[in-house]
Structure formats: C-alpha cells, structure tokens
C-alpha cells in the first residue's frame, strides 16, 4: 500500500438534486393521479378537467412526500428499515386481500373518497418498499470489486463509514508504540498525516544534532511500516489553516474540521484539544492503564496450590489468573502466605510474577493459614488450578 496524497479541497458532491429514478417516479405519480381523476370524474368533459388537475397535483405532492421520506429513511438504523419493510408488506398484502375478496371494483373506485385514500397507499407503499429493499441490500451485500472506489482520500476511504479518522502527531509517530497496536488490531485507521507533520519529521531527520536526527529517521521509518500494513490506510493530507502558525493548533483545527481524533503522546496537546471539543488517544495514558497490578517490592497474599518446575518453587495464581512463582515455596503447598514481589515477566501468553516469602526463616515462623483438607481447597479455588495439581 502506498501513501496516497489527498486533495486540499473537500470532496464536493456533484450528484443532481433528483436522480433519474426519482424524476421518473414523480412523473408516474402525476400520471396515476390524473388517471384517477379521469376515472372518478363525472361523464361531462367540463367536470373532468378539474378532477384531473386536482388529483394529478395530489399525486405529484404524494411523490414529493415519498422522496422526503426516502431521504430520512436512509439515516435510519437497519433494524428500523427491516421493521418498516415488513409493515409495508403486511399493509399491501392486506389491501390486495380485500381487493381479491371482491370488495368493489378496486380500491380506486369504491366511493367518492376512495381516490384520496387509494392514491397515498398505491403510490407511497410500493416506492418506499422498493427504496428500503435497495438500501438494505446495499448495506448487507458488499459491492463488486470493480465498482469500489479507487480513491484513497479520507472522505472516500474503503474503511467502514463509522470508523473515526485519526490524526497522527509527530510525538506518537516517533514513539513507535502505535505500530504494534495497529499490527495487533487494537488501533484501526484511517490515519491522516498532515504535511506539516511530515515536514517536521523530515526536518528532524536532516538535523545536525544526532539525537534529533535519530528521532526524525525513526519517525519516518515507523510511518513507512504503518503504510505497509495491508489493512491500514495512511493518507497524507494537505489541510492547512493560513491563520494558524503553531503545528499543535493546526492539528486541533484539522481534527475539528474532519471530526477526527488526535493520536499523540503530548499531554499538553491532548488537554488543549479536549478543551476545544477534540478527543485524543494518548499512548502514554494507555500504557498507564495497562500497568502491572503489582510492582517489585510490594507484598501480596497468595495461596500456593502446587509445586513449580524449578527446584523448591511453589506456584500460586492471582484472581485475574496471573501466575505467581514463589521461590522456596515448594514446602508451603496448601498454605496462604504473604510474599514479596521481586520481578515480573511479560510474554505473549500473559504475565508471570516472581516472588519470595516475606521472611527467610524457618517455615514454622511463616504466617501460615493451612486449609483443613484438600476438599476445602477444591471448593475455594478454581477447578482449573486444582486440576493442574493432578
């Protein structure tokens, strides 16, 4: 995937006010209304014209109402559309059933008031049902590959329409932790990189200072790796506010215009953006929230339920399933003791905590709380832990 430049101007819709099928539908409404007026009017020709004009205008008005309903239906939830479609089907089926049962010569000729009832039913129901069905099919079925847009601009991205665009700040790019977040799928695009941010990274990469040069090259390398992810959209945008000189304020203005979020490690930028109604994603805040539950030097209380693989080790687990390896804990299986955390190890399968008993004296001096028997241990601790003992 290549980084695609985006236009500085917003995408302007060139769709006409009414599409061809909408014009045809209005003409059909006019003709049906005029035909109803012709069949409903008396035999005298002088009385036919007013009814034709009146019911023709009524049919045209009903068509305009249907188009108005269509525009509002497109914003409805899928479940609402499905429910509305079922209701329309039931209504039309009921009308057809009454006609089949021989109640008059048809709905349009049952009485003098029938045209005013029949026109809305026969003009609104089929059209709305058709539009709703088309919209549902477009929502549920993907478009053919050859019909999908090839433009990679942020306004016509191939990503779902409900995906929030994210502006990348230079601090988050240089930090590099967004790369594994994107690789594992925890952070999704599309990502927007203003040209001002790209220029800032290039300036750092060309700097005479070694530290700045390393940061700039690292940022460009991270950005290149992001664009190579197959499921990630990275777009260089040329948005620029001429009245704003600071890059941070430029980011906030662009985010407000595009209703995007800012990905940054700059705490001050995140706070200023929040005051202006722009949300940000701070990788440092995420790291803080994912910090270990315990730190080296802290004392925790654990139940040693089996021996470990290492000599003299005991195995315990925290409530969240984290394994605790207790050195010199093999002789304390079946007891709850207090241990001091020495270190922890993070792997792709979880976290392991290493610890030692709170005191290194004789086991008789430990603060032991032995369980009366093995059955109580089974009832108090998860089955998976007890099964491991076997």
Image (tube, rainbow, N blue to C red):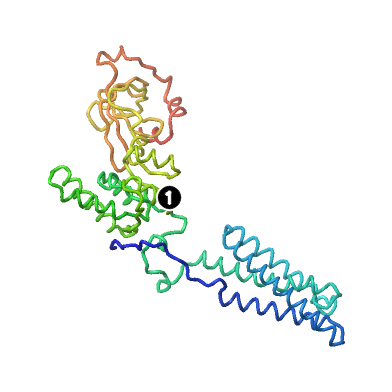
**Farthest-out residue, top:** 365
For the C terminus, which image quadrant? top left
- Residue 390 visible to an observer of this rendering: no
Q: Quadrant of residue 339?
A: top left
- Residue at the spot of label 1: 256
Along the viewing direction, whichever of 218 and 339 lies nearer the viewer? 218
In the visual, does 253 lie left or right of 89? left
- As helix, strand or loop, the secondary structure at mark 1 comes to helix
Along the viewing direction, whichever of 303 and 203 lies nearer the viewer? 203
Q: Is residue 99 above or below residue 371?
A: below
Q: Quadrant of residue 177?
A: top left
For the N terminus, which image quadrant? bottom left
Residue 86 point in image, percent of width and height: 66, 64
Q: Residues within 10 Å of mark 1 (few under 14, many from 20)?
A: some
Q: Is residue 60 above or below residue 353?
A: below
- Residue 299 visible to an observer of this rendering: yes
């Amino acid at each position: 995937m290549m980084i695609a430049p985006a236009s500085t101007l917003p995408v302007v819709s060139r769709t006409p006010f009414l599409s061809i099928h909408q014009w045809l539908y209005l003409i059909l409404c006019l003709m049906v209304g005029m035909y109803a007026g012709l069949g409903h009017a008396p035999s005298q020709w002088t009385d036919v014209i007013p009814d034709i004009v009146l019911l023709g205008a009524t049919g045209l008005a009903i068509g305009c109402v249907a188009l108005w309903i269509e525009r509002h239906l497109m914003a409805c939830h899928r479940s609402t559309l499905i429910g509305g479609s079922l209701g329309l089907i039931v209504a039309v089926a009921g009308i057809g059933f009454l006609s089949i049962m021989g109640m008059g010569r048809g709905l349009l000729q049952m009485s003098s008031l029938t045209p005013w009832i029949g026109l809305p039913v026969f003009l609104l129901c089929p059209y709305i049902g058709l539009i709703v069905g088309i919209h549902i099919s477009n929502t549920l079925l993907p478009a053919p590959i050859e019909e999908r847009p090839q433009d990679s601009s942020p306004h016509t991205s191939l990503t779902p329409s409900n995906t929030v665009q994210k502006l990348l700040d230079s601090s988050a790019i240089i930090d590099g932790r967004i790369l594994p977040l994107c690789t594992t799928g925890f952070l999704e695009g599309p990502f927007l990189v203003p040209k001002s941010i790209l220029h800032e990274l290039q300036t750092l990469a060309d700097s005479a200072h070694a530290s700045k040069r390393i940061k700039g090259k690292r940022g460009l390398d991270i950005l290149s790796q992001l664009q190579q992810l197959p499921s990630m959209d990275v777009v260089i945008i040329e948005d620029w506010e001429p009245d704003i000189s600071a890059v941070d304020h430029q980011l906030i203005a662009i985010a407000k215009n595009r209703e995007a979020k800012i990905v940054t490690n700059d705490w001050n930028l995140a706070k200023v953006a929040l005051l202006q109604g722009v949300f940000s994603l701070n990788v440092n805040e995420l790291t803080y929230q994912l910090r270990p539950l315990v730190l080296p030097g802290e004392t925790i209380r654990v139940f040693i339920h089996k021996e470990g693989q290492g000599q003299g080790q005991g195995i315990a687990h925290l409530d969240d399933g984290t394994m605790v390896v207790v050195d010199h804990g093999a002789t304390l299986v079946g007891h709850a003791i207090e241990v001091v955390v020495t270190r922890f190890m993070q792997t792709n399968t979880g976290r392991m905590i290493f610890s030692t008993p709170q005191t290194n004296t004789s086991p008789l001096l430990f603060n032991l709380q032995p369980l009366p028997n093995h059955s109580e241990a089974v009832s108090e601790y998860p089955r998976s832990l007890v099964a491991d003992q076997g």
